[in-house]
Amino acid sequence: MRIIREERDRYRTELTDAAVLEAIGPCDGLRVLDAGCGEGYLSRTLAARGAHVVGVDAAQGLIDAAAGTPAPGPGSVTFTRASVAALPGPDAEFDLVVCNHLFSHLHDPGTAVAEFGRVLKSGGRLVILTLHPCFYVENSEQGAMNSVPASRYFGSRGIDQRFMVDGLESPSLITSWLRPLEYYSGTLRDAGFVIADLREPHPTEDQLQNDPWWRKGFPTAMFMLLVAERR
């Protein structure tokens, strides 16, 4: 949480947050679910843009931290402890679901995607920002460029590692789950979604040429952003 609140994760602050917000676009008046909201920074950002946000996370400590932080208007935000595999609330409640840096932490995301489809209105959108399943490998943040062999790519693969962000190491091992592209498209299709856009957020030429941090820390495509529409 300290890394997020002190804005020490440059992947988020200089790359993926902007990509997610661009994909969301204008959200004034929209009913939004922030799935896996963490300490709530994205929920607060969307509320400041006029959205009415419900943030959910399975960790009570993060929900408590999120609920204890003032959120600017003109929108609103509430936080609830819940698993994304069993969301509270009725069907067709939301215009937009945002799943930011969560998908790779789900051992079985199919149940969560089905829940996203349940709580979205017809025509509602799902925005997923996750690790790139084709290219992300252990220690990519440290410049690793190993390829993923076909024998591993076409199944689910878990990467266990401690993340180092701006000198701070995660206290425990974090598992990132990666699956082939066809898994994402098939899981979304089975839950009633149509993929509307696929983007691969990456640094600008200026960032790569003038900042050694980005040249080392982005050795290959590391992120994938999906926008899907509920039928």
Image: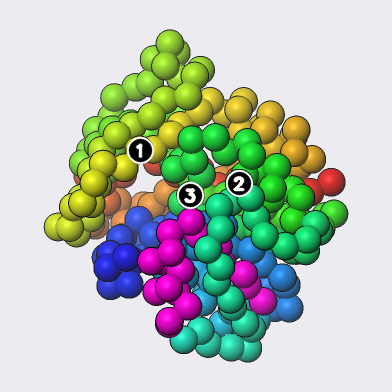
Contact? badges 3 and 1 (CB < 8 Å): no
- Name the residue furthest top: 151
Relative horizontal placement of residue 147, taking residue 198 as reference (left or right): left
Element type where label 2 sits in the image: loop
Q: Earlier in the sequence, mark 2 or mark 1?
A: 2
Relative horizontal placement of residue 167, taking residue 192 as reference (left or right): left
The residues bearing labels 2 and 1 have C-alpha atoms spaced at a distance of 18 Å
Element type where label 3 sits in the image: loop
Q: Which residue is mark 2?
A: 85
The kind of residue on which mark 2 rests is Ala
Q: Vertical placement of 160 versus 58: above or below? A: above
Residue 229: image x %, image y %? 76, 49
**Residue 62 counted in the magenta span:** yes
Tell me the residue at 80%/57% (across/down). 91
**Residue 213 counted in the magenta span:** no
Element type where label 1 sits in the image: strand
Tell me the residue at 53%/87% (across/down). 72
The kind of residue on which mark 1 rests is Thr
Residue 184: image x %, image y %? 61, 33
- For the magenta stretch, what is the residue range? 52-69
Residue 148, can we see it?
Answer: yes
Residue 119: image x %, image y %? 74, 56
Q: Which residue is mark 3?
A: 102
Question: Quarter of the image holding residue 28?
Answer: bottom right
The residues bearing labels 3 and 2 have C-alpha atoms spaced at a distance of 12 Å
The residues bearing labels 3 and 1 have C-alpha atoms spaced at a distance of 11 Å
Q: Earlier in the sequence, mark 3 or mark 1?
A: 3
Q: Quadrant of the N terminus?
A: bottom left
Q: Which residue is mark 1?
A: 175
Tell me the residue at 43%/11% (across/down). 151
Q: 33 or 63, which lies in front?
A: 63
